[in-house]
Every structure is written in C-alpha cells, then in structure tokens.
Amino acid sequence: MLRTSYSQILNSSRDFSTAICHADGRLVAQAEHVPIHVGALPWAAQAVLNRFQDGIRPGDVFLMNDPYHGNNHLPDVTAFVPVFTGNVLRCWSINRSHQSDIGGATHGGYNPGATEIWQEGIRIPPVRLYEAGVRRDDLLHMISTNVRHARDFEGDLAAMIGSARLGESRLLALLEEYGPETAIQGVESVLDAAERRTRANIASWRDGVYRGEAVIDDDGHGARDIHIRAKVTKRGSDLTVDLTASDPQVTGFINSSYANMRSAVAMALAYLIDPDTPKNDGTFRPITVIAREGTVVWAKPPAPVTLCTNHCAQEIGEAIIKALAPACGDRAMAGWGRRFRIAIQGRNPNTGRQFIWHLFHARPGGGASSAGDGWPAAGEWQAAGGIKFGSVEVMEARFPLFFRRHEFRPDSGGDGQYRGGTGSILELVMETTEPALANTAGDGARHGACGMTGGSDGAPHHYRLLSGRRKRVLRTKETGVRVQPGDVFLVESGGGGGWGDPARRLPEARRADVENGFTTAKGARKRVSGRR
C-alpha cells in the first residue's frame, strides 16, 4: 500500500489500515496503524454481508464509505476482498484508506460548513466493484467523477485493492498449508485467548460505577462546550459503557456515526489493557455498550459526521479512560493533543497541475503515562502515533511549500510526575503564484489535552495566518480561507497531558527538559513555583 498509493495522505502520512475479518464479519487481526479505523470494520463487513448475502463469489471486490451503512465517515473508503476455499467464504481481506478528496462542497474531505451529510461528499453504500474478477468500469467512472482528482483517487483505489488481494493470496496459502477447518479453528482459538487475557486484565481492576466526561470546543455552528459523558460499570471481568447522558447531536460535523462510536469505545479499552494483547473480536467481548440515537455520539441521519473519527471519537475515549482511571490504577494515560488540520487547494506553478495538500506536520504531543513522559509531536489519541507526517524535503519537492521552521513547541506539554509530550511550531510559506483556498477541521483551541491522576492539561492549539502585514487567528472549523502567494501559516500545536503529581517530578528531569528545549527556563520556574 505504501509503495503503490498515489496520494500524500496515504504514501507519506499512512492514513490507512488493513485488517482481516472472519466470514461473519468478526475482527480477526489488524495492522498497527489507526485504531479508530479498525474498530469500526466489523459493522462495515456486516453491512456488506447483509446487502449481498448469498450472492458473494470468488473474485468479487466490494466498496463502501457511507457512515449510515456501517462505515465511520465518508473519506474512509473501504475495500473488501472475500477469501474463499472452493465455494465456502472463509474470511475477508480489508483495506480502509482516507481519501485526499471525496467530493462534496469543499476540497479535502472535510466540510466545516456542512449541515447534512450530502454536503460532505459522495456516499457509497455497499457496492460490488468487481464481479467474479471483472471490474465494473461504469461504476468506477461514476464514483471517480464525483471527486476532485479522479486520477489520484483511481490510483489509490487500485493500491487498496492490490493490498487486499495480496492479503487474500497469503490467507489462501495459510488455508492450504493447514487446511481450512484447522485454520479457522485456530482463528477461534486466537479470539478466545484474547478474550481470556482481556478479562484477566479487567478482573484485576476495582469493581464499581465510574463516571467521566470530555468537552469538545464547538461544532462550528454556534454550539460550544459539547459534552461527552460516560458511565462505566465494572463487575468482575465485564464492563458496561453507558453514553446516553452525552449531549444531543449538533448542527456541525462533530456528530458520530454508530460504527465510529463503537470503535471509539473499543479503542479506549485497547489503551487500558496489556499492550501485547491482540486487538480482535475476542478482546472486545467483555464490553456492553449503551447509547442513545440522537445524541452527539450516535447521530440520526442526515446529520454531518465527517470529523467524528477525530472529534468526537477522541472525546468518547477520553471520557471512558477518565471514568476508569480510579479503577485501573496506573493504566490510564493522559490525553493526547487534538486534531487541527488544514487542507490547501491550489495550482502548483512548477507543474501547472491542481493540488490538494493536507497538513500532517506540526503534530500535537502525546499524553504522559505511568511509563514515562509523553512522546513529542506524536499526534492525536485516536491514531496513537499511527498517522505520520512525511518528509519535509519530499513535501517541498512535491508541493509549492517552504517549511521555514518546524520544531518542538516548548512549555506545551502538561506538567506532572511525567510530562506530556510537546506540540510543534511550524512556519509554512506558500510558494504559489496565484491565490489558493484552505479550510480547517479540528478542535482543541480552547480545551487542551487532559491531564491524568493529578497531571496538568496540555496547552491548546494556536494557529494563525500571516497575509502581508495582517495576522489573524484561524478557527478550527473554517471554509473558504483565501491564501495569497507568500502567505505564512503560523502553527503552534497543543501538547499532551501530564500524568501524576507534578511535585513528584525529579529535579534532574526538569533540568533535562530545559536542556532539551521541551521547556524554557522561565516555564520551568513557573512549573516549580506552581507546585508550591
């Protein structure tokens, strides 16, 4: 996938995931990329099964992206390759990839101005793109006509399908070597073993009913301080997560689809159990989820939902982890920085071609934990470092951009026994020769990443656009931002939350923070005086 995909968002930033599901849609195995992608796949696989039932054949390839048909959000197009032995469906090889553009009213896959899903992009319910090995070119042409860069979309889709077919060939080799029945029995054993390990983890936590909440800045349409509330009941080795007290769905695109909400719940548990426990269907069997349709965590159609894989997914996970922190001791890590991306559409003067560029650089900081300080510039919680920023030099070669400054942001990580990871500072100069257009999508300019067990919150984002002598603050949810040649984006991304009592941070750790530029001398003095 990395070697053959066309778009920067995939071949550099790795915003894709691969997985294997059982014939009935249960998650069997996943690559270590983007947790929020994979946790939603069982609902997508089930939607394909429900739509085509007994009509699935060898050589078929299915496609979908619709969050109201089992997907999480529209930019994540998902390709499904069924794996057969004889005429028996054994499993699914799946690739889910975030597209650089998915049509709709704005470029880049996110529309902060959307008030209904049809304004966000083309909706693809489960469809059969290949029928018994033959591609339906009319269907492919219809889909690619509805996105801005059809060539890149078709190239990325070919890479996705090639990736899933390679998974199919390797699965077929496994099934042939051990025999289908033995191999599938092995799958069941793997799932059962993951359940046992997860239940053993949960059983060691304290029984009780716990509550946590997280707050989203706004929806871009006037709603502010939108609350996600989790009540988590822990009994023995079982967890019941109740999200029904979350705020009602809003006008803007922070609402969550059902599959995305379920994925966020699974993601939260995955962060609390032993890291070497496989993440599959067995892992998540101990969880019962209660939610109410019409809330921000489970929106009714046709609400827009495109930002949900970031926000409110991150806040769903945050509320659950905050709730369970008193129960599971040192396992609860502090919050990671929130997503704030910029998508720029313009013409590259070096090639004469239109381009869409997504800001994956200047990542926010990761949250601290009982294991130590948070990772600097690691990204957001719902990806946990799985999404990368590409080479600065490659970006400058491929796009009309100049990275004048790209470094860690001192004093941005939350204080604690272990410090939150620092965010980033970026000065990005536009080297276009004609005006470009940008939009933003994200959160965290008011509420920073949460501290945990006495740690401080990380600093929030601060993004600005310098155009001539005029400097203005960029909001997290804007469309139609005019970008002139020579304009400069001034980005200061948020830091991760701190973990534990700041009074317990070792003096030598504070000195090292100053020496390494993670905190300034002034900031260090402020933190020490704040402890008193």
Image (cartoon, grey):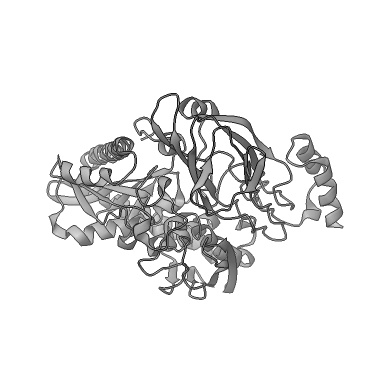
| Vertical side of 64 occupied by 157: above or below | above
Instruction: Give coordinates of residue 484: x percent, y percent.
Output: 54, 37
Side (left or right) of 386 relative to 39 = right
Which image quarter holds the C terminus?
bottom right
What residue sits 45% from the left and 47% below the top? 34
**Residue closest to the eye, 354 or 266:** 354
Residue 220 visible in the picture:
yes
Decide: is 452 above or below 400: below
Classify residue 99 by image quadrant.
top left
Q: Nearer the viewer, residue 181 or 120?
A: 120
In the rendered image of this protein, does residue 149 appear above or below residue 21?
A: above
Position in image of residue 78 (x %, y %): 31, 49
Q: Residue at x 61, y 47 (%)?
A: 366
- Residue 338 image offset from top left, x and y in percent: 57, 52
Residue 173 on image: x %, y % = 24, 37
Q: Is residue 29 left or right of residue 405?
A: left
